Image (tube, helix red, strand yellow):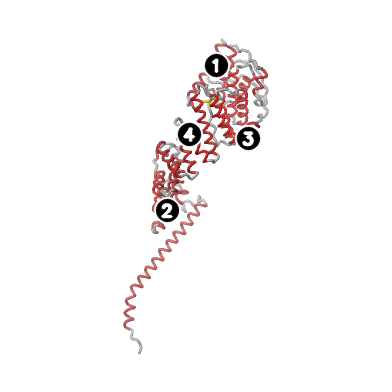
């Protein structure tokens, strides 16, 4: 009865894990047997302080791990804790060399495991895996260490070691995860999971800020995949492609845009490339940063045509407008800016703050370019559209000031004065919440309005004086004609 119960629990664990793994895209699963999910480590993740190279990674601080049966609350719904002999494993955190832990006990020859014992070990592994995936790594770790210290078959010990590494990743202990992966590679250098473990190490090194070591690991992925690939061609092909992507990403993060653009271009030419929108987006950014404006225009237009609903669309249109402006194609540049600022609400609904940022940045940049170059009608068109993007005073008042300045340049002082007056009318409303920058806008607007008023008065006085001079001119002439010179 107990054996039947244990098999049922093991089967439920395995079924739970398979169902969860099946919901993930195949490209995001770790290893051919899908034993672990592949976690994407972002390049922007905060680096681990005082991270050391792989050869210098030391053991974690001392802790005592005592293996015991997990409580019911830590197990999946319907699971019962299985009574097991209580084995206390005292370690220095995770042992400095986990391989020594089970090799000392098992020796080179491993005894045969009975079916009942194997079922028990598999159940323990599945339970530990479940605990890890439910963010209970501290409960899972002692169970995994016990599997390494026991008489489990090699395949179970391999899985336990990898699960332990991922537990360390989940706990943000990148150095310890690196140490465990290195021990796995040392013990099983020809394992078919080696390329993906190398990929994980590269991602961890990049997270730790060790970018050169990360690049070394990514290149090693491609080398090891060529050596190991047999009946898993599609799997290794995906790994190699991801390694190439990570190499490009690493160069991109370091600001090495020439190298990054080279790798992104290669990836784009591969017919089976995943995430082509991301690759094309970053290639356009690299070319823009390098001042390759013709290539930027080609990349951006290709992106907008193929991925019209991509979240990167506003930034791509910004780079397109900027590249067109640099190549003196002002009308096309203005058209792109106006398209960006007039995008329908349906497109901006999901990420309004992103759209607003790029709309404002593009409008400001191109509008100011046109103003400095003396193209005031086009600059005014941009500024009027900018004023509609945000109703807050912090945005409205500076834009209106620029609109008024443009009216002055277009010899429309009346409209300029009216716009300055609109700005000054807001001064009393914002008396208690006026920032230093808005105070400057109010002062400049007041000075410009007073200047326009003075200029209008001066011109009016000049017109009156001129009119009087013209009216009195004939009278003066007639008097002069009647004067008789003295003989």
Count of marks overlaid on the render: 4
Q: Which residue is mark 3?
A: 51
C-beta proximity under 8 Å, tags 1 and 2: no
Q: Which residue is mark 1?
A: 10
Secondary element type, mark 1: helix
Q: Which mark is residue 267?
A: 4
Secondary element type, mark 3: loop
Residue 130 image point, x, y percent: 55, 22
Tell whether 477 sits left or right of 379.
left
Separation of disc 1 and disc 3 at Cα? 39 Å
Q: Which residue is mark 2?
A: 403
Query: Which of the two discs, 1 and 4, sits closer to the camera?
Result: 4
Residue at 51% in and 31% down: 242
Residue 78 image point, x, y percent: 53, 18
Separation of disc 1 and disc 4 at Cα? 43 Å
Query: Which of the two discs, 1 and 3, sits closer to the camera?
Result: 3
Separation of disc 4 and disc 3 at Cα? 31 Å
Q: Earlier in the sequence, mark 1 or mark 4?
A: 1
C-beta proximity under 8 Å, tags 4 and 3: no
Instruction: Classify mark 1: residues with Cα within 10 Å, few (<14), some (14-19) or many (20+).
Output: many
C-beta proximity under 8 Å, tags 1 and 3: no
Q: Is residue 465 above or below residue 232?
A: below
Query: Which of the two discs, 2 and 4, sits closer to the camera?
Result: 4
Tell whether 472 sits left or right of 447.
left
């Amino acid at each position: 009865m107990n054996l039947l119960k244990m098999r049922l629990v093991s089967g439920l664990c395995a079924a739970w894990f398979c169902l969860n793994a099946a919901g993930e895209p195949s490209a995001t699963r770790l290893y051919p047997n899908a034993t672990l999910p592949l976690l994407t480590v972002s390049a922007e993740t905060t680096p681990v302080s005082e991270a050391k190279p792989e050869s210098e990674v030391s053991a974690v601080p001392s802790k005592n791990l005592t293996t015991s049966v997990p409580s019911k609350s830590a197990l999946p719904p319907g699971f019962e804790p299985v009574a097991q002999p209580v084995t206390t494993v005292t370690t220095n955190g995770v042992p400095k060399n986990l391989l020594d832990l089970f090799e000392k006990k098992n020796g080179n020859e491993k005894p045969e495991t009975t079916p009942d014992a194997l079922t028990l070990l598999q159940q323990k592994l599945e339970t530990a895996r479940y605990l890890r995936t439910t963010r209970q790594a501290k409960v899972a770790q002692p169970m995994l260490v016990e599997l390494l210290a026991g008489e489990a078959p090699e395949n179970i010990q391999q899985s336990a070691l990898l699960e332990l590494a991922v537990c360390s990743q989940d706990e943000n202990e990148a150095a310890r995860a690196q140490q465990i992966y290195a021990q796995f590679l040392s013990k099983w250098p020809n394992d078919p999971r080696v390329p993906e473990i190398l990929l994980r190490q590269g991602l961890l090194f990049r997270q730790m800020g060790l970018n050169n070591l990360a690049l070394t690991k990514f290149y090693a992925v491609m080398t090891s995949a060529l050596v190991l690939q047999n009946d898993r061609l599609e799997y290794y092909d995906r790994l190699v492609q991801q390694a190439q992507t990570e190499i490009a990403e690493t160069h991109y993060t370091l600001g090495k845009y020439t190298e990054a653009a080279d790798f992104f271009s290669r990836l784009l030419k591969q017919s089976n490339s995943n995430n082509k929108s991301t690759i094309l987006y970053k290639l356009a950014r690299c070319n823009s940063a390098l001042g390759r404006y013709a290539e930027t225009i080609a990349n951006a237009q290709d992106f907008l045509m193929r991925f019209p609903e991509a979240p990167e669309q506003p930034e791509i249109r910004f780079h397109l407008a900027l590249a067109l402006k640099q190549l003196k194609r002002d009308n096309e540049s203005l058209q792109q800016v106006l398209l960006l600022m007039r995008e329908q609400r349906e497109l901006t609904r999901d990420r309004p703050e992103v759209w607003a940022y790029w709309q404002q940045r593009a409008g400001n940049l191109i509008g100011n370019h046109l103003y400095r170059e003396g193209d005031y009608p086009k600059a005014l068109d941009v500024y009027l559209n900018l004023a509609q993007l945000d109703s807050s005073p912090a945005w409205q008042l500076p834009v209106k000031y620029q609109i008024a300045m443009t009216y002055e340049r277009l010899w429309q002082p009346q409209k300029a004065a009216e716009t300055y007056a609109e700005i000054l009318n807001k001064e009393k409303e914002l008396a208690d919440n006026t920032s230093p920058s808005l105070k400057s806008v109010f002062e400049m607007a007041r000075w410009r309005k007073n200047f326009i008023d003075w200029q209008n008065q001066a011109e009016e006085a000049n017109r009156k004086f001129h009119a009087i001079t013209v009216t009195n001119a004939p009278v003066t002439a007639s008097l002069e004609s009647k004067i008789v010179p003295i003989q």
